[in-house]
Image (cartoon, rainbow, N blue to C red):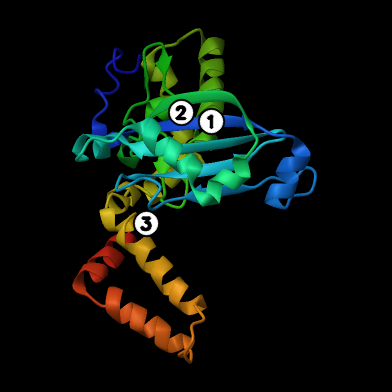
């Protein structure tokens, strides 16, 4: 509808991702035991690295009262560039079979499966999310933000929906649903945390598209941590020596400096 109203162009693969999610039913007491929770508590896990074999994206697992929500978010452009071509359902099944996941969902009953196209918008919202008789909210307005450590969108959808409702209420009182009246919606957005956060983290997608963020750096961190905790047959070297050796082998180069400079922008 936003495209037909002339408020946005067609989505490009770079600015879109596909989200896959399974809702898995488990007894509340089983969920509490497996995640170390007390009644009324919840847990959320985020995953990135080898779970998306070379693709831009990540995974999530969070608890509900009597279900688990398990899913992946995968960049569509990554699929177009992957060789050989990868299939989403195979990546998802491999994710479920991983040691970190399998024991948490064991014995669960699949209650729901869904897939959703996420228009990430390059971390930039529509320049004009309103027109004559229309306001655009949530991810349809590009109000989704990939910050690397988390993908935000739900709170933006709720907040923008609330602000849109306030705008429509004012328009109804005036009996005028023209663009000039509905422009209040954008004013309210600018005053809210939504567009302020979008502006602060507007460069995050550019930084996170660096394949080293989901490839080299997770592998390097796991290798160094393994060396720190490993107890072998011979004497163990100092922790500082292990860290320095890891830094010298993986981080002391010009490419890492470039990556750090990019990360400063987020």
Give the x, y percent position of residue 246.
35, 78
- Helix, strand, or loop for circle 1? strand
Question: Which image quarter is the N terminus in?
Answer: top left
- Helix, strand, or loop for circle 2? helix
Q: CA distance from mark 1 to mark 2?
A: 22 Å
- Of the two numbered discs 1 and 3 on the same chain, state the one appearing first in sequence: 1
Residue at x 42%, y 49% (from the top left corner): 147
Identify the residue under disc 1: 22
Q: Is residue 236 left or right of residue 55?
A: right
- Quarter of the image where one finds residue 247: bottom left
Residue at x 34%, y 41% (from the top left corner): 123
Identify the residue under disc 3: 266
Identify the residue under disc 2: 138
- Mark 3, other Cα within 10 Å: few <14 / some 14–19 / many ≥20: some
Give the x, y percent position of residue 260.
30, 66
Q: Is residue 80 left or right of residue 166?
A: left
- Mark 1, other Cα within 10 Å: few <14 / some 14–19 / many ≥20: some
Question: Which image quarter is the C terminus in?
Answer: bottom left
From this viewpoint, is residue 184 visible? no
- Of the two numbered discs 2 and 3 on the same chain, state the one appearing first in sequence: 2
How many numbered marks have been drawn onto this rendered protein structure? 3
Q: CA distance from mark 1 to mark 3?
A: 31 Å
Residue at x 44%, y 46% (from the top left corner): 197
Residue at x 33%, y 27% (from the top left corner): 128
Foreground label between 1 and 3: 1
- Quarter of the image where one finds residue 223: bottom left
245 vs 69: above or below? below
- Helix, strand, or loop for circle 3? loop
């Amino acid at each position: 509808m936003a495209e037909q109203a002339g408020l946005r162009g067609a989505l490009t693969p770079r600015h879109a991702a596909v989200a896959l999610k399974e809702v898995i039913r488990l007894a509340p007491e089983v969920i509490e035991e497996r995640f170390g929770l007390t009644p009324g508590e919840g847990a959320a896990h985020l995953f990135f690295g080898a779970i998306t074999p070379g693709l831009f994206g990540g995974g999530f697992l969070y608890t509900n009262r009597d279900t688990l929500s398990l899913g992946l978010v995968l960049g569509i452009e990554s699929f177009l560039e992957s060789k050989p071509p990868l299939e989403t359902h195979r990546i998802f099944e491999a994710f479920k079979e991983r040691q970190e996941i399998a024991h948490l969902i064991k014995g669960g009953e699949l209650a729901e499966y869904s897939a959703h196209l996420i228009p990430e918008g390059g971390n930039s919202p529509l320049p004009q999310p309103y027109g004559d008789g229309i306001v655009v909210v949530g991810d349809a307005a590009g109000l989704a933000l990939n910050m690397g450590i988390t993908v935000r969108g739900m709170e933006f959808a709720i907040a923008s929906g609330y602000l849109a409702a306030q705008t429509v209420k004012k328009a109804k009182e005036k009996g005028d649903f023209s663009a000039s009246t509905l422009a209040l919606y954008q004013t309210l957005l600018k005053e809210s945390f939504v567009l302020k956060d979008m502006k602060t983290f507007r460069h995050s997608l550019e930084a996170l598209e660096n394949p080293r963020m989901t490839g080299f750096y997770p592998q390097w961190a796991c290798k160094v941590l393994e060396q720190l905790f490993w107890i072998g047959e011979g004497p163990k070297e100092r922790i500082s020596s292990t860290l320095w050796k890891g830094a010298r082998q993986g981080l002391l180069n010009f490419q890492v400096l470039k990556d750090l400079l990019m990360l400063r922008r987020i």
